[in-house]
Amino acid sequence: MTQPIALTCGEPAGIGPEIAARAWDRLRGTLPFFLIGDPRHLPDGVPVAEIGSPREAATASRNALPVLVHPFPSLASPGKPVPGHAAEIIAVIARAVDLVGRGEAAAICTLPIHKKALKDGAGFAFPGHTEYLAALAGVERVVMMLACEALRVVPTTIHIPLSDVPSALTAGLLRETIRITDRALRRDFGVARPRIAVAGLNPHAGEGGAMGSEEIAMILPVIRELQGDGLAVGGPYPADTMFHAAARKEYDVAVAMYHDQALIPIKTIDFAGGVNVTLGLPFVRTSPDHGTAFDIAGQGRADPSSVIAALRMAAATAASRAAAAA
């Protein structure tokens, strides 16, 4: 990796400023990254190097947190989002996409945003980071993967109410989710033939139709179609038996049907070390697998483990993608 990673500031009223500073303190010059944001939002006493270009980040990061300055209209108030900050939070994300698109950054790592604050303050029209990044990249379909050392999992449907899942879960959506996941694991994670385990939607994967018909009518036909195309896909499996230690050894990634079916297992297994990865983008994007944590913001209690894992995964994935393209 020849270029540094761009770390977007996220919601400055959350724990983002604290974990950015702590991540730099632990990594120092070993993994060059730079923060895009307002240095006034960082905790007092953090050494800061204001840089004019990402190329300065590697040298600067040995002694200070490199910051590509993006001015905000005011100081941050921990735990209390400022409506006037919303437009700049969104602009920082767009700026990072521009930098990685021009080859000035190797990858993007995003600190947590608060979607309601962005909607209230700037009319943010996207369900989350994932969908906004897809729009910026001009990509119609991307996939959210959560990853830690012990597990990778992909939710087929993401930020929608549970009551909307059955109608949103179509054969086309599931098929494309599995295909994007397969391609990404090959290109970005160096898995030669990814083993993909697909969960059922209903309890006991429908139990032969006794608890629901989606597995028979839609999920199984998609799995068989993709098996016919050479993908190593299995299922549908009961979600309640897919995530114990022995079961996890049998696959490289689990594809779940909805948000909590995917996120509960990984956050239980490794809450601090989980990483959110967006698959299907023309650039690498990772994020810590937690939110803004307004309740502890500004108290010096935030754990930087997830953002450190996200930065490391961004670097490794960017290197793997570059090697695959060579």
Image (spheres, helix red, strand yellow):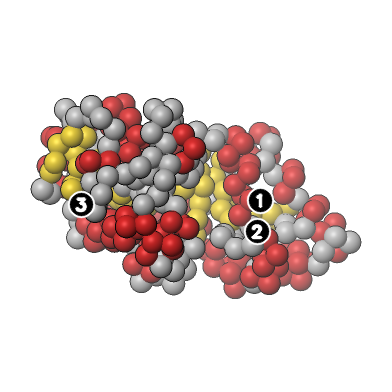
What is the CA distance from the residue labelled 1 to the residue labelled 2? 7 Å
Which residue is more in the foreground, 43 or 211?
43
What is the CA distance from the residue labelled 3 to the residue labelled 2? 40 Å
For disc 1, the neighbor class at 10 Å (few under 14, some 14 to 19, many from 20) is many
Which residue is more in the foreground, 184 or 102?
102
For disc 3, the neighbor class at 10 Å (few under 14, some 14 to 19, many from 20) is some
**Residue 31 pos. (x, y %):** 26, 35
Say above or below: 225 vs 30: below
Residue depicted at x 24% and y 58%:
95
Q: Nearer the viewer, mark 3 or mark 2?
A: 3
**On the rendered structure, is 226 left or right of 19?**
right
Q: Secondary structure at mark 2?
A: loop
Whether residue 221 is visible, yes or no, is no
Q: Which mark is residue 71?
A: 3
Residue identified by numbered label 1: 261
As shown in the figure, which amino acid type bears the numbered disc 3? Pro
Which residue is more in the foreground, 133 or 140?
133
Q: Nearer the viewer, mark 3 or mark 1?
A: 3
Residue depicted at x 36% and y 71%:
138
Q: Are marks 1 and 2 in contact (CB under 8 Å)?
A: yes
Total marks shown come to 3
**Residue 115 pos. (x, y %):** 46, 57
What is the CA distance from the residue labelled 3 to the residue labelled 1? 39 Å
As shown in the figure, which amino acid type bears the numbered disc 1? Gln
Q: Quadrant of the C terminus?
A: bottom left
Residue identified by numbered label 2: 257
**On the rendered structure, is 117 left or right of 318?**
right
Say above or below: 272 vs 135: above
Q: Quadrant of the N terminus?
A: top left
